[in-house]
Every structure is written in C-alpha cells, then in structure tokens.
Image: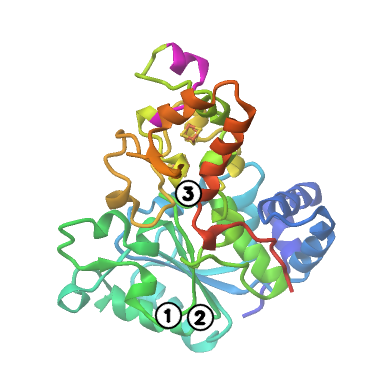
Amino acid sequence: MLRSSLPEALRSRGVSRRRFIDFCSAMVATLALPERYLAAVADALNRTDRPVLVWLEFQDCAGNTESMLRSDDPPVADVVLELLSWEYHETIMAGAGKQAEAALKRVVEQEAGKYIAVVEGAVPTADGGVYCTIAGRTALDIAREVCTHAAATIAVGACAWDGGLVRSAPNPTGAVGLQEAVPGIKVVNLGGCPHNVANTAAVIVHYLTFHQMPALDQYNRPLFAYGRLIHDQCERRAHYDAGQFVEEWGDEGSRKGWCLYKMGCKGPDATYNCPTVRWNSGTSWPVKSGHGCIACASHRFWDVMSPFYKPLPKVPGFGVDVTAEEIGWGVVGGVAALTAAHAVASVFRPKEEVPKEDKPA
Ligand code: SF4
Ligand code: SF4
C-alpha cells in the first residue's frame, strides 16, 4: 500500500511546519532529552515511513482512546494520527464487521514484524477467555496473534497494564493485563486511568527516532514518565513540609492550596509525570485543581490505593514510622529537619524507579 510521507499527511490535515516543530519540542521535553535532540527528532519524523498501527480494545471503557483523541494543544492528536498509518481501531475506523476484520488480518499477514500494536483494556482468561470475543474470536486469541507478530506492543491504561478495575475482586472473568495474558511478548506499559497521550506519543516518537523503546522500569514503564514521585514534583509540597494540610473540603487550607495528604492524596507513594505533563492541553492536573492523587498510574491501584479518601497510613523514613502531620510540624522552620523531610521521598521511591538519564542509541 502506498503511504504518503509525514509532511504530506500533515499538510493535508492543516498542521503547519511551526506546529509540527512545536510538537517535536514538546516530545523532546516529555522524553527528558536535551534540547539539542530537537533537530534529530524532527528530521527522523520527517523521514519516517509511517509504520502501520493496529489498536485493539478488549475489556475497556474506551477512555484511553478518548484521552488520545481529545488532545489538542500541542497538536498531539493531529501529529500522532499522522505519524502512523492507522489500519485498525474499532472505535474510530470507518470500516466495520468483516471489512474491519479483514484489515486486521491483512496487517498481521503482510506487515508481520513491522507494525506497532496498541492494546487498551484487560484480557479475560477464565473459561477459555469467552467473556470478551470479537468476530467470534476471544480477546486472548487475538492478543496472542496480533502482539506476537508486532514489531512493538504498547499497553495503554491501567486495565491493559495490570488488569485495572476489571481485575479487582471478585474478577469473575479472570481478567489480567496484557503482559500476563501473553507472556513472552515485549510490552511497554503506559499505566494511568486513562493514559496520558503525551507519554504515548513520546514513546512512539522515541521508537521512530531511535528505533528502540525508551528505558523502562521494573514494570516495563518508561522511566521518563514513571521515574519520579508525584510528591517530589507537586506545587503543594512546601505546605506538606510545613505541616499545612487541608482538613476538610472547602476549609481555609483548601482555599489557600495547602497539601491534600489528609484528604487521601497518594502522591507520596506514586510515580508519574502527571504534575509536569498535566491534562487539558497542559492546563492543570488533579492536585493543582484541588483533589488528591489516587495513584492511577501505580500497580493495581484500584486495590492497593483505595479507599481513595483515606490518608496513606504512615510515612516511613525516620527510623520509626510517623504520620505526615508529625513530620510536617516537626520540620517547621528547621533547615536540618527539612533536609530530613526531603529524604522521605528517596526512602519511598523504589530503588528500581530512581530516574536514570535516558540514553538513546
Ligand atoms: S501529599 Fe499530595 S498534595 Fe501533598 S505535597 Fe504530596 S503530592 Fe502534593
Ligand atoms: S493526579 Fe494522580 S490519580 Fe490523578 S491523573 Fe494524575 S497520576 Fe492519576
């Protein structure tokens, strides 16, 4: 199939050269690459042959598809849609039924080893996987075939990563994440509920530029996005250190933007670049808007991090476990104690998730 070049495709979509460079610049920043990589990224994307992408949806709510399509500024959605040749995506493709399934079959047969597979949603494994079937085939069967023939597979959202909400007890369908359903395939997991499209775009841009996936953590999540504690990037952190907490919704602390720890914020135990990439065109993120983080990008967060409005029980790191309030009041005004408070973060942070410099080939 003859595919137009990326510059041609962007022109036809009305994306100017300036907007394209803005996009490249945003991707370089998201990937935590030095600015000097901007030219290399733009050049690589201009020359890409726009590999085929197939997007599979299993036990999902389509929230990750929505997250991707609703992006607008920088024009992530426009450029991502044109970076790749989208051949199969149930929610947005024009074709349906046998026509759609024929498109997927053609990709697996004719583009084997060259296409990118994106998976959204959990995979049911109970009773042979009968609880999610598409065109008469189980999700398990489709995932095995499509992902084992792909050049790279990306699992977007909590459900595709670790089973998400679908896997929470009692889990009657035996739902699991993609990696567990199809062991042996190499998956990049982009946790989050939903995923942030800026990170998904950055992974694709990294792959197209350097011909390899970015550095990953122990959960196969990209370090550029999941390598730092939310607590360490939060604009309310000074209030945590000073022992200034919101005690109830709408109180004085709430109006003054104080720390949301006591309202259940899980930021001290969650890693993600949510505070820097943000949402709604980079406008804000939940903690900035006044709600605690529920750790949606953490492993099995529906089970591990709930109840969402209950504070994390203890803050380890001072020889004995103490509450956040005790730390806060203990450090007010004390430089030495503030240093100790910052040490909390490194105690929380699993050693495997310590940020490393992303070193492209
Ligand atoms: S507990 Fe939550 S609101 Fe408070 S500083 Fe940490 S991440 Fe920010
Ligand atoms: S603030 Fe926390 S729960 Fe909310 S979107 Fe960001 S990472 Fe997810």
Which quarter of the rendered picture does the N terminus lie within? bottom right
Residue at 25% x, 66% y: name it: 175
Q: Residues within 10 Å of mark 1 (few under 14, many from 20)?
A: many
Residue 80 belongs to the span the image colors magenta: no
Answer with left or right where residue 89 lies relative to residue 306: right
- Residue 175 seen in this snapshot: yes
Instruction: Name the amino acid type tagged 2.
Output: Ala
Compute the Cα span from label 2 to label 1: 6 Å
Q: Is residue 10 left or right of residue 145?
A: right
Q: Residue at x 15, y 58 (%)?
A: 170
Residue, disc 3: 348
Does the image show residue 280?
A: no
Q: Which residues are magenta?
A: 252-261
Q: Residue at x 44, y 84 (%)?
A: 148
In the displayed structure, 151 sits above or below 245; it is below
Select label 1 or label 3 by which is in front. Answer: 3
CB-based contact (under 8 Å), mark 2 and mark 1 = yes
* Coordinates of residue 51 in the picture (x, y in percent): 62, 74
Is the C terminus in the top left, top right, bottom left or bottom right quadrant? bottom right
Using a 10 Å C-alpha cutoff, classify the residue at mark 3 as few (fewer than 14 neighbours), some (14 to 19) or many (20 or more): some
Secondary structure at badge 2 equals: loop
Residue placed under numbered mark 1 in the picture: 146
Amino acid type indicated by mark 1: Val
Counting from the top left corner in percent of width and height, residue 114 is at 58, 82
Q: Amino acid at mark 3?
A: Phe
Identity of the residue furthest to the front in this view: 319
- CB under 8 Å between discs 1 and 3: no
Could you say where residue 15 lies in the image, as x and y percent from the top left?
Answer: 72, 50
Real-space Cα separation, disc 1 to disc 3, in angstroms? 38 Å
Tell me, yes or no, whether the two marked residues, 3 and 2, touch with CB atoms within 8 Å. no
Name the residue tied to disc 2.
150
